[in-house]
Image (tube, rainbow, N blue to C red):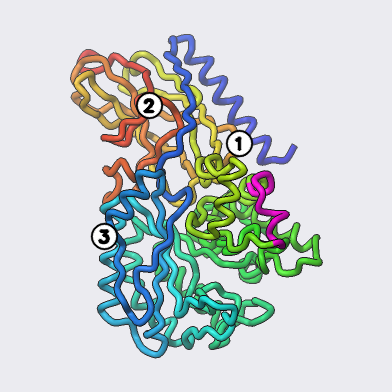
Protein backbone atom coordinates (compact mmCIF):
# COMPACT_ATOMS: atom_id res chain seq x y z
CA UNK A 1 0.00 0.00 0.00
CA UNK A 2 1.42 3.43 -0.94
CA UNK A 3 2.05 6.03 1.75
CA UNK A 4 -0.75 8.34 0.51
CA UNK A 5 -3.33 5.52 0.53
CA UNK A 6 -2.22 4.52 4.02
CA UNK A 7 -2.59 8.09 5.29
CA UNK A 8 -6.06 8.36 3.74
CA UNK A 9 -7.13 5.05 5.32
CA UNK A 10 -5.70 6.16 8.66
CA UNK A 11 -7.67 9.41 8.48
CA UNK A 12 -10.90 7.51 7.81
CA UNK A 13 -10.28 5.11 10.69
CA UNK A 14 -9.43 8.01 12.99
CA UNK A 15 -12.66 9.78 12.03
CA UNK A 16 -14.71 6.62 12.64
CA UNK A 17 -13.03 6.21 16.04
CA UNK A 18 -13.72 9.81 17.01
CA UNK A 19 -17.39 9.38 16.08
CA UNK A 20 -17.65 6.22 18.18
CA UNK A 21 -16.12 8.03 21.17
CA UNK A 22 -18.57 10.92 20.89
CA UNK A 23 -21.45 8.48 20.46
CA UNK A 24 -21.20 7.93 24.19
CA UNK A 25 -22.60 11.46 24.48
CA UNK A 26 -25.38 10.54 21.99
CA UNK A 27 -25.20 11.85 18.45
CA UNK A 28 -28.05 12.84 16.23
CA UNK A 29 -27.55 11.30 12.79
CA UNK A 30 -29.40 11.83 9.53
CA UNK A 31 -29.13 10.09 6.18
CA UNK A 32 -30.16 11.84 2.99
CA UNK A 33 -31.90 11.05 -0.27
CA UNK A 34 -30.09 11.60 -3.55
CA UNK A 35 -31.51 13.82 -6.30
CA UNK A 36 -31.40 12.95 -9.99
CA UNK A 37 -32.15 16.50 -11.15
CA UNK A 38 -29.71 18.55 -13.21
CA UNK A 39 -29.40 22.10 -11.89
CA UNK A 40 -27.05 25.03 -12.29
CA UNK A 41 -23.90 24.95 -10.16
CA UNK A 42 -20.87 27.24 -10.31
CA UNK A 43 -17.99 26.50 -12.73
CA UNK A 44 -19.25 23.19 -14.05
CA UNK A 45 -21.49 21.63 -16.67
CA UNK A 46 -22.36 22.39 -20.25
CA UNK A 47 -21.52 25.94 -21.30
CA UNK A 48 -22.99 28.19 -23.96
CA UNK A 49 -20.67 30.06 -26.30
CA UNK A 50 -21.08 33.71 -27.26
CA UNK A 51 -18.95 36.12 -29.27
CA UNK A 52 -19.57 39.47 -27.60
CA UNK A 53 -16.98 41.35 -29.68
CA UNK A 54 -17.41 40.29 -33.30
CA UNK A 55 -15.44 41.12 -36.42
CA UNK A 56 -14.64 44.74 -37.27
CA UNK A 57 -15.49 45.69 -33.70
CA UNK A 58 -19.25 45.22 -33.92
CA UNK A 59 -20.56 45.13 -30.37
CA UNK A 60 -22.78 42.18 -29.43
CA UNK A 61 -23.11 42.36 -25.68
CA UNK A 62 -23.99 39.47 -23.41
CA UNK A 63 -27.77 39.37 -23.19
CA UNK A 64 -29.28 39.10 -19.68
CA UNK A 65 -32.40 37.39 -21.05
CA UNK A 66 -30.26 34.84 -22.87
CA UNK A 67 -28.28 34.11 -19.70
CA UNK A 68 -31.41 33.88 -17.54
CA UNK A 69 -32.95 31.31 -19.89
CA UNK A 70 -29.74 29.26 -19.87
CA UNK A 71 -29.50 29.40 -16.08
CA UNK A 72 -33.08 28.13 -15.76
CA UNK A 73 -32.03 25.18 -17.95
CA UNK A 74 -29.18 24.27 -15.57
CA UNK A 75 -26.33 26.21 -17.22
CA UNK A 76 -24.14 28.68 -15.36
CA UNK A 77 -21.13 28.97 -17.69
CA UNK A 78 -20.60 31.02 -20.85
CA UNK A 79 -17.48 30.91 -23.02
CA UNK A 80 -16.89 34.35 -24.45
CA UNK A 81 -14.84 34.57 -27.65
CA UNK A 82 -13.46 38.08 -27.86
CA UNK A 83 -12.31 38.58 -31.46
CA UNK A 84 -9.67 41.26 -31.89
CA UNK A 85 -9.16 41.30 -35.66
CA UNK A 86 -8.95 45.05 -35.99
CA UNK A 87 -6.33 45.29 -33.23
CA UNK A 88 -3.61 43.10 -34.74
CA UNK A 89 -1.34 46.13 -35.16
CA UNK A 90 -2.51 48.53 -32.47
CA UNK A 91 -3.42 48.78 -28.79
CA UNK A 92 -6.89 47.93 -27.56
CA UNK A 93 -9.08 51.00 -27.30
CA UNK A 94 -11.58 52.00 -24.64
CA UNK A 95 -14.38 50.42 -26.70
CA UNK A 96 -12.92 46.94 -26.13
CA UNK A 97 -12.02 47.48 -22.48
CA UNK A 98 -15.38 48.97 -21.56
CA UNK A 99 -17.24 46.25 -23.49
CA UNK A 100 -15.36 43.55 -21.58
CA UNK A 101 -16.12 45.16 -18.23
CA UNK A 102 -19.81 45.52 -19.13
CA UNK A 103 -20.01 41.82 -19.97
CA UNK A 104 -18.40 40.89 -16.65
CA UNK A 105 -21.06 42.92 -14.85
CA UNK A 106 -23.80 41.22 -16.89
CA UNK A 107 -22.43 37.78 -16.03
CA UNK A 108 -22.27 38.62 -12.33
CA UNK A 109 -25.82 39.98 -12.30
CA UNK A 110 -27.13 36.72 -13.78
CA UNK A 111 -25.26 34.13 -11.71
CA UNK A 112 -22.80 33.19 -14.47
CA UNK A 113 -19.10 32.44 -14.58
CA UNK A 114 -17.14 33.19 -17.75
CA UNK A 115 -14.63 31.07 -19.67
CA UNK A 116 -12.56 33.68 -21.49
CA UNK A 117 -10.75 33.44 -24.80
CA UNK A 118 -9.19 36.17 -26.91
CA UNK A 119 -8.34 35.55 -30.57
CA UNK A 120 -7.40 37.58 -33.62
CA UNK A 121 -9.48 35.54 -36.08
CA UNK A 122 -12.31 33.06 -36.40
CA UNK A 123 -11.93 31.22 -39.74
CA UNK A 124 -14.97 29.49 -41.19
CA UNK A 125 -13.22 27.60 -43.99
CA UNK A 126 -10.60 24.89 -44.30
CA UNK A 127 -7.72 27.32 -44.88
CA UNK A 128 -7.27 28.06 -41.19
CA UNK A 129 -3.47 28.15 -41.51
CA UNK A 130 -3.82 31.42 -43.42
CA UNK A 131 -5.54 33.08 -40.47
CA UNK A 132 -3.56 35.97 -39.08
CA UNK A 133 -2.65 36.55 -35.47
CA UNK A 134 -0.60 39.45 -34.04
CA UNK A 135 3.13 40.00 -33.43
CA UNK A 136 4.43 39.13 -29.97
CA UNK A 137 4.83 42.75 -28.85
CA UNK A 138 1.19 43.48 -29.67
CA UNK A 139 -0.03 40.34 -27.88
CA UNK A 140 1.92 41.21 -24.74
CA UNK A 141 0.65 44.80 -24.91
CA UNK A 142 -2.94 43.55 -25.13
CA UNK A 143 -2.48 41.21 -22.18
CA UNK A 144 -1.06 44.09 -20.13
CA UNK A 145 -4.07 46.22 -21.03
CA UNK A 146 -6.46 43.44 -20.05
CA UNK A 147 -4.75 42.69 -16.74
CA UNK A 148 -6.58 45.29 -14.56
CA UNK A 149 -9.95 44.07 -15.85
CA UNK A 150 -9.09 40.38 -15.41
CA UNK A 151 -8.05 41.00 -11.83
CA UNK A 152 -10.98 43.25 -11.02
CA UNK A 153 -13.48 40.69 -12.29
CA UNK A 154 -11.69 37.46 -11.37
CA UNK A 155 -14.62 36.54 -9.14
CA UNK A 156 -16.73 35.73 -12.21
CA UNK A 157 -13.93 34.21 -14.32
CA UNK A 158 -14.05 30.42 -14.25
CA UNK A 159 -10.77 30.14 -16.14
CA UNK A 160 -8.95 31.62 -19.13
CA UNK A 161 -8.18 29.67 -22.30
CA UNK A 162 -4.72 30.71 -23.47
CA UNK A 163 -5.99 32.02 -26.83
CA UNK A 164 -4.28 34.77 -28.88
CA UNK A 165 -2.15 32.37 -30.98
CA UNK A 166 -3.18 31.05 -34.38
CA UNK A 167 -6.57 30.16 -35.87
CA UNK A 168 -9.36 30.56 -33.29
CA UNK A 169 -6.63 31.25 -30.71
CA UNK A 170 -6.10 27.50 -30.63
CA UNK A 171 -2.29 27.29 -30.62
CA UNK A 172 -1.76 24.89 -33.52
CA UNK A 173 -0.53 27.44 -36.09
CA UNK A 174 0.66 31.05 -36.12
CA UNK A 175 1.23 33.62 -38.85
CA UNK A 176 3.74 35.36 -36.54
CA UNK A 177 5.60 32.25 -35.43
CA UNK A 178 4.25 32.54 -31.92
CA UNK A 179 4.46 28.76 -31.65
CA UNK A 180 6.44 26.12 -33.54
CA UNK A 181 4.34 24.59 -36.28
CA UNK A 182 3.60 21.84 -37.28
CA UNK A 183 5.40 20.39 -34.27
CA UNK A 184 3.14 22.40 -31.91
CA UNK A 185 6.14 23.00 -29.68
CA UNK A 186 6.72 25.88 -27.33
CA UNK A 187 9.14 28.56 -28.45
CA UNK A 188 10.26 31.77 -26.77
CA UNK A 189 7.17 33.82 -27.79
CA UNK A 190 4.76 31.10 -26.61
CA UNK A 191 6.51 30.89 -23.24
CA UNK A 192 6.37 34.67 -22.89
CA UNK A 193 2.62 34.66 -23.58
CA UNK A 194 1.95 31.92 -21.01
CA UNK A 195 3.99 33.79 -18.42
CA UNK A 196 2.13 37.03 -19.14
CA UNK A 197 -1.28 35.35 -18.89
CA UNK A 198 -0.43 33.77 -15.54
CA UNK A 199 0.80 37.12 -14.26
CA UNK A 200 -2.30 38.95 -15.54
CA UNK A 201 -4.63 36.70 -13.53
CA UNK A 202 -4.65 36.41 -9.74
CA UNK A 203 -3.09 33.21 -8.42
CA UNK A 204 -6.55 31.79 -7.73
CA UNK A 205 -7.34 31.46 -11.46
CA UNK A 206 -6.10 28.99 -14.07
CA UNK A 207 -5.02 29.15 -17.69
CA UNK A 208 -6.03 26.25 -19.95
CA UNK A 209 -3.71 25.09 -22.76
CA UNK A 210 -4.90 23.32 -25.89
CA UNK A 211 -2.35 20.47 -25.96
CA UNK A 212 -1.00 18.37 -23.07
CA UNK A 213 2.40 18.36 -24.81
CA UNK A 214 2.73 22.08 -24.11
CA UNK A 215 2.39 21.69 -20.35
CA UNK A 216 4.85 18.80 -20.40
CA UNK A 217 7.34 20.99 -22.27
CA UNK A 218 7.00 23.56 -19.51
CA UNK A 219 7.18 21.30 -16.46
CA UNK A 220 8.14 17.78 -17.52
CA UNK A 221 6.08 14.62 -17.89
CA UNK A 222 5.20 14.16 -14.20
CA UNK A 223 1.65 15.32 -13.42
CA UNK A 224 0.71 17.39 -10.39
CA UNK A 225 0.66 15.67 -7.02
CA UNK A 226 -1.45 16.68 -4.06
CA UNK A 227 1.28 18.62 -2.28
CA UNK A 228 1.57 20.95 -5.30
CA UNK A 229 -2.16 21.30 -5.87
CA UNK A 230 -3.66 24.81 -5.56
CA UNK A 231 -0.30 26.18 -4.41
CA UNK A 232 -0.34 29.13 -6.80
CA UNK A 233 2.75 27.80 -8.58
CA UNK A 234 2.61 28.02 -12.40
CA UNK A 235 2.32 24.25 -12.82
CA UNK A 236 -0.66 24.17 -10.45
CA UNK A 237 -2.40 26.93 -12.44
CA UNK A 238 -2.30 25.42 -15.93
CA UNK A 239 -5.13 23.13 -17.02
CA UNK A 240 -6.38 21.86 -20.36
CA UNK A 241 -8.99 22.53 -23.02
CA UNK A 242 -9.56 20.07 -25.84
CA UNK A 243 -11.43 21.62 -28.76
CA UNK A 244 -11.81 18.41 -30.74
CA UNK A 245 -12.86 15.94 -28.06
CA UNK A 246 -13.71 12.49 -29.49
CA UNK A 247 -13.21 13.74 -33.07
CA UNK A 248 -10.68 11.04 -33.98
CA UNK A 249 -8.19 8.65 -32.41
CA UNK A 250 -6.03 11.64 -31.44
CA UNK A 251 -8.86 14.16 -30.94
CA UNK A 252 -7.53 15.73 -34.14
CA UNK A 253 -4.02 16.32 -32.89
CA UNK A 254 -4.55 16.64 -29.15
CA UNK A 255 -2.52 13.44 -28.73
CA UNK A 256 -0.35 14.09 -31.82
CA UNK A 257 0.18 10.81 -33.72
CA UNK A 258 -2.69 8.43 -34.52
CA UNK A 259 -0.22 5.63 -35.28
CA UNK A 260 1.50 5.86 -31.91
CA UNK A 261 -0.85 4.16 -29.45
CA UNK A 262 1.60 4.24 -26.52
CA UNK A 263 1.90 8.01 -26.99
CA UNK A 264 -1.88 8.44 -26.97
CA UNK A 265 -2.14 6.32 -23.82
CA UNK A 266 0.65 8.35 -22.22
CA UNK A 267 -1.09 11.69 -22.80
CA UNK A 268 -4.41 10.36 -21.53
CA UNK A 269 -2.80 8.94 -18.40
CA UNK A 270 -1.06 12.26 -17.82
CA UNK A 271 -4.36 14.18 -18.07
CA UNK A 272 -6.11 11.62 -15.86
CA UNK A 273 -3.61 12.36 -13.09
CA UNK A 274 -2.98 16.07 -13.71
CA UNK A 275 -6.68 16.94 -14.00
CA UNK A 276 -7.29 15.90 -10.41
CA UNK A 277 -6.24 19.43 -9.50
CA UNK A 278 -6.71 21.56 -12.64
CA UNK A 279 -9.53 22.29 -15.05
CA UNK A 280 -10.37 20.21 -18.15
CA UNK A 281 -12.78 21.84 -20.58
CA UNK A 282 -13.42 22.14 -24.32
CA UNK A 283 -15.78 21.00 -27.03
CA UNK A 284 -16.49 18.34 -29.63
CA UNK A 285 -15.83 19.29 -33.25
CA UNK A 286 -16.68 16.42 -35.59
CA UNK A 287 -19.21 13.64 -36.13
CA UNK A 288 -17.88 12.26 -39.43
CA UNK A 289 -16.66 8.73 -40.08
CA UNK A 290 -13.39 9.15 -38.18
CA UNK A 291 -15.34 10.26 -35.09
CA UNK A 292 -17.93 7.49 -35.10
CA UNK A 293 -15.92 4.95 -33.09
CA UNK A 294 -15.53 7.54 -30.32
CA UNK A 295 -18.66 9.70 -30.00
CA UNK A 296 -20.99 6.94 -28.81
CA UNK A 297 -22.41 7.25 -25.30
CA UNK A 298 -20.44 4.31 -23.98
CA UNK A 299 -17.07 5.73 -25.04
CA UNK A 300 -17.97 9.35 -24.29
CA UNK A 301 -18.93 8.57 -20.69
CA UNK A 302 -15.75 6.58 -20.18
CA UNK A 303 -13.53 9.34 -21.60
CA UNK A 304 -15.29 12.15 -19.74
CA UNK A 305 -14.84 10.26 -16.49
CA UNK A 306 -11.23 9.16 -17.06
CA UNK A 307 -10.09 12.61 -18.19
CA UNK A 308 -12.09 14.41 -15.46
CA UNK A 309 -14.04 16.87 -17.56
CA UNK A 310 -15.52 19.92 -15.82
CA UNK A 311 -17.24 21.75 -18.70
CA UNK A 312 -18.19 21.19 -22.33
CA UNK A 313 -19.63 23.32 -25.13
CA UNK A 314 -23.36 22.74 -25.54
CA UNK A 315 -23.44 24.55 -28.89
CA UNK A 316 -20.76 22.56 -30.72
CA UNK A 317 -20.65 20.07 -32.32
CA UNK A 318 -24.47 19.86 -32.64
CA UNK A 319 -24.47 16.41 -34.26
CA UNK A 320 -22.40 14.96 -31.42
CA UNK A 321 -24.75 16.48 -28.86
CA UNK A 322 -27.67 15.03 -30.82
CA UNK A 323 -26.00 11.59 -30.77
CA UNK A 324 -25.91 11.72 -26.97
CA UNK A 325 -29.55 12.75 -26.83
CA UNK A 326 -30.52 9.96 -29.21
CA UNK A 327 -28.51 7.28 -27.39
CA UNK A 328 -29.76 8.45 -23.99
CA UNK A 329 -26.68 9.69 -22.13
CA UNK A 330 -27.07 13.44 -22.55
CA UNK A 331 -28.80 13.95 -19.20
CA UNK A 332 -26.19 11.90 -17.37
CA UNK A 333 -23.40 13.94 -18.96
CA UNK A 334 -25.20 17.16 -18.00
CA UNK A 335 -25.43 16.01 -14.38
CA UNK A 336 -21.89 14.69 -14.07
CA UNK A 337 -19.74 17.29 -15.84
CA UNK A 338 -17.49 18.69 -13.15
CA UNK A 339 -18.40 17.89 -9.56
CA UNK A 340 -21.71 16.52 -8.29
CA UNK A 341 -21.49 16.46 -4.52
CA UNK A 342 -24.04 14.38 -2.65
CA UNK A 343 -24.51 14.25 1.12
CA UNK A 344 -24.92 10.72 2.45
CA UNK A 345 -24.94 11.18 6.21
CA UNK A 346 -24.38 13.84 8.85
CA UNK A 347 -24.00 13.65 12.63
CA UNK A 348 -23.86 16.20 15.43
CA UNK A 349 -24.54 16.20 19.18
CA UNK A 350 -27.90 17.49 20.41
CA UNK A 351 -26.20 20.30 22.33
CA UNK A 352 -22.85 22.11 22.22
CA UNK A 353 -20.10 21.40 24.72
CA UNK A 354 -19.63 23.62 27.74
CA UNK A 355 -17.17 25.86 25.89
CA UNK A 356 -19.76 26.54 23.19
CA UNK A 357 -18.33 24.32 20.47
CA UNK A 358 -19.97 21.64 18.39
CA UNK A 359 -18.38 18.89 16.30
CA UNK A 360 -20.01 17.91 13.02
CA UNK A 361 -19.35 14.82 10.92
CA UNK A 362 -20.27 14.57 7.26
CA UNK A 363 -20.04 11.74 4.75
CA UNK A 364 -20.39 12.70 1.10
CA UNK A 365 -19.81 11.31 -2.37
CA UNK A 366 -18.75 13.04 -5.57
CA UNK A 367 -20.81 11.52 -8.39
CA UNK A 368 -19.33 13.86 -11.01
CA UNK A 369 -16.44 13.49 -13.43
CA UNK A 370 -14.20 15.98 -11.59
CA UNK A 371 -13.83 18.09 -8.47
CA UNK A 372 -14.10 21.88 -8.01
CA UNK A 373 -10.96 23.60 -9.32
CA UNK A 374 -11.33 27.15 -7.96
CA UNK A 375 -11.30 28.17 -4.27
CA UNK A 376 -14.48 27.30 -2.43
CA UNK A 377 -15.80 28.24 1.00
CA UNK A 378 -17.23 25.94 3.67
CA UNK A 379 -19.71 27.37 6.18
CA UNK A 380 -21.94 26.14 8.98
CA UNK A 381 -24.75 28.06 10.64
CA UNK A 382 -27.59 27.58 13.06
CA UNK A 383 -31.10 28.47 11.91
CA UNK A 384 -33.69 29.42 14.49
CA UNK A 385 -37.31 28.32 14.26
CA UNK A 386 -38.04 31.85 13.06
CA UNK A 387 -35.60 31.37 10.18
CA UNK A 388 -32.74 33.59 11.35
CA UNK A 389 -29.21 32.35 10.55
CA UNK A 390 -26.38 32.48 13.07
CA UNK A 391 -23.01 31.68 11.41
CA UNK A 392 -20.58 29.43 13.27
CA UNK A 393 -16.84 29.98 13.42
CA UNK A 394 -15.01 26.93 12.06
CA UNK A 395 -11.58 26.04 13.41
CA UNK A 396 -10.25 24.55 10.18
CA UNK A 397 -12.44 24.36 7.10
CA UNK A 398 -11.99 21.50 4.61
CA UNK A 399 -11.06 22.19 0.98
CA UNK A 400 -13.77 20.91 -1.42
CA UNK A 401 -11.25 21.02 -4.28
CA UNK A 402 -9.78 17.82 -2.84
CA UNK A 403 -13.12 15.97 -2.94
CA UNK A 404 -12.29 13.71 -5.86
CA UNK A 405 -14.81 11.29 -7.37
CA UNK A 406 -12.78 8.18 -6.57
CA UNK A 407 -12.35 8.93 -2.87
CA UNK A 408 -14.83 8.56 -0.02
CA UNK A 409 -15.33 12.01 1.49
CA UNK A 410 -15.31 12.18 5.28
CA UNK A 411 -15.41 15.60 6.91
CA UNK A 412 -15.01 16.43 10.59
CA UNK A 413 -15.23 20.06 11.65
CA UNK A 414 -15.22 21.79 15.00
CA UNK A 415 -17.26 24.99 15.16
CA UNK A 416 -17.75 27.70 17.76
CA UNK A 417 -21.21 29.08 18.49
CA UNK A 418 -21.65 32.85 18.34
CA UNK A 419 -21.66 34.87 21.55
CA UNK A 420 -25.01 35.99 22.96
CA UNK A 421 -26.96 33.35 21.06
CA UNK A 422 -30.59 33.44 22.22
CA UNK A 423 -31.70 30.29 24.00
CA UNK A 424 -33.67 27.92 21.81
CA UNK A 425 -33.67 25.08 19.29
CA UNK A 426 -31.62 25.48 16.13
CA UNK A 427 -31.24 23.51 12.92
CA UNK A 428 -27.72 22.93 11.62
CA UNK A 429 -27.14 24.40 8.16
CA UNK A 430 -24.34 23.79 5.64
CA UNK A 431 -23.16 26.02 2.78
CA UNK A 432 -20.34 25.88 0.21
CA UNK A 433 -20.26 29.54 -0.82
CA UNK A 434 -18.03 31.47 -3.17
CA UNK A 435 -15.11 32.79 -1.11
CA UNK A 436 -15.08 36.23 -2.73
CA UNK A 437 -16.97 38.89 -0.71
CA UNK A 438 -18.62 40.10 -3.92
CA UNK A 439 -20.29 36.70 -4.40
CA UNK A 440 -20.35 35.00 -0.99
CA UNK A 441 -23.88 36.12 -0.14
CA UNK A 442 -25.31 35.26 -3.58
CA UNK A 443 -26.81 31.72 -3.41
CA UNK A 444 -26.36 31.29 -7.19
CA UNK A 445 -22.62 31.09 -6.56
CA UNK A 446 -22.90 28.53 -3.75
CA UNK A 447 -22.56 24.83 -4.54
CA UNK A 448 -25.86 23.00 -4.34
CA UNK A 449 -25.67 19.41 -3.14
CA UNK A 450 -27.38 16.68 -5.17
CA UNK A 451 -29.96 15.83 -2.51
CA UNK A 452 -33.71 16.03 -2.19
CA UNK A 453 -35.23 18.63 0.12
CA UNK A 454 -32.09 20.22 1.61
CA UNK A 455 -31.41 23.28 -0.56
CA UNK A 456 -32.58 26.73 0.48
CA UNK A 457 -32.37 28.80 -2.71
CA UNK A 458 -32.91 32.00 -0.74
CA UNK A 459 -29.75 31.63 1.38
CA UNK A 460 -27.56 29.07 -0.41
CA UNK A 461 -27.59 26.85 2.70
CA UNK A 462 -28.64 23.20 3.10
CA UNK A 463 -30.92 22.25 6.00
CA UNK A 464 -29.34 19.17 7.58
CA UNK A 465 -32.30 18.23 9.77
CA UNK A 466 -30.03 18.09 12.84
CA UNK A 467 -31.34 20.14 15.77
CA UNK A 468 -29.38 21.52 18.69
CA UNK A 469 -30.55 23.14 21.90
CA UNK A 470 -28.25 26.05 22.56
CA UNK A 471 -28.11 29.60 23.75
CA UNK A 472 -28.03 31.68 26.91
CA UNK A 473 -28.34 28.78 29.34
CA UNK A 474 -25.45 26.87 27.76
**Image location (x, y in percent) of residue 299:** 68, 48
Q: Residues within 10 Å of mark 2 (few under 14, many from 20)?
A: some
Magenta span contains residue 293: yes
Which residue has dot 1 on it?
A: 407
Q: Nearer the viewer, residue 450 or 234?
A: 450
Find the magenta span and give its range: 289-300
Circle 3 crowding by C-alpha within 10 Å: few under 14, some 14–19, many from 20 = some
Q: Could you tell me which residue is drawn at 67 percent across and 69 percent down?
A: 253
Dot 2: element: loop
Q: How far is mark 3 from mark 1, CA to CA?
A: 37 Å
x then y, percent, for residue 33 = 47, 22
Q: Are there few (<14), some (14-19), or many (20+) residues within 10 Å of tag 1?
A: few
Which of the two residues, 142 or 474, is positioned nearer the viewer here?
Answer: 142
Check the image and name the residue furthest to the bottom: 89
Residue at 64% across, 36% down: 7
Residue 309 left/right relative to 385: right
**Labelled disc at residue 105:** 3
Q: Earlier in the sequence, mark 3 or mark 1?
A: 3
First-in-chain label (3 vs 2):
3
The image quadrant of residue 65 is bottom left
Residue 421 location in percent, x, y? Answer: 21, 23
Q: Distance between the residues labelled 1 and 2?
A: 23 Å
Position of residue 73 relative to residue 426, above or below, is below
Q: Quadrant of the rendered structure where residue 223 is?
A: bottom right
Split into 4 quadrants, where in the image is the C terminus?
top left
Q: In terms of secondary structure, where does tag 3 sit?
A: helix
User: Which residue occupies 54% across, 32% down?
Assistant: 365
Magenta stretch holds residue 318: no
Identify the element where label 1 is drawn: loop
Q: In the image, residue 219 lies at what x, y percent? A: 63, 67
Residue 198 in sight: yes
Q: Which residue matches tag 2? A: 454
Amino acid sequence: MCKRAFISLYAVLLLMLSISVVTAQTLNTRTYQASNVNFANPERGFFIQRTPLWRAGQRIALDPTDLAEAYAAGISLVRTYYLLERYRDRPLDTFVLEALQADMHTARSNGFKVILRFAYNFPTNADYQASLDAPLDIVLQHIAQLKPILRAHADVIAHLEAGFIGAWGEWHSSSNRLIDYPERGLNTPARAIISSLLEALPQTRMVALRYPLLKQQLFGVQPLHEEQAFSGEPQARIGAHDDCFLASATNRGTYLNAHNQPQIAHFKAYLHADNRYVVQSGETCNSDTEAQPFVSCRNALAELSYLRWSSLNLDYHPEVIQTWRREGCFEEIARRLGYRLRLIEASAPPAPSQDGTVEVWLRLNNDGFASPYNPRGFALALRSVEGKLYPLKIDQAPDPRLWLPERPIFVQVRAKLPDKLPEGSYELMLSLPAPEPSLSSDPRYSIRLANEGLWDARTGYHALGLWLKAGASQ
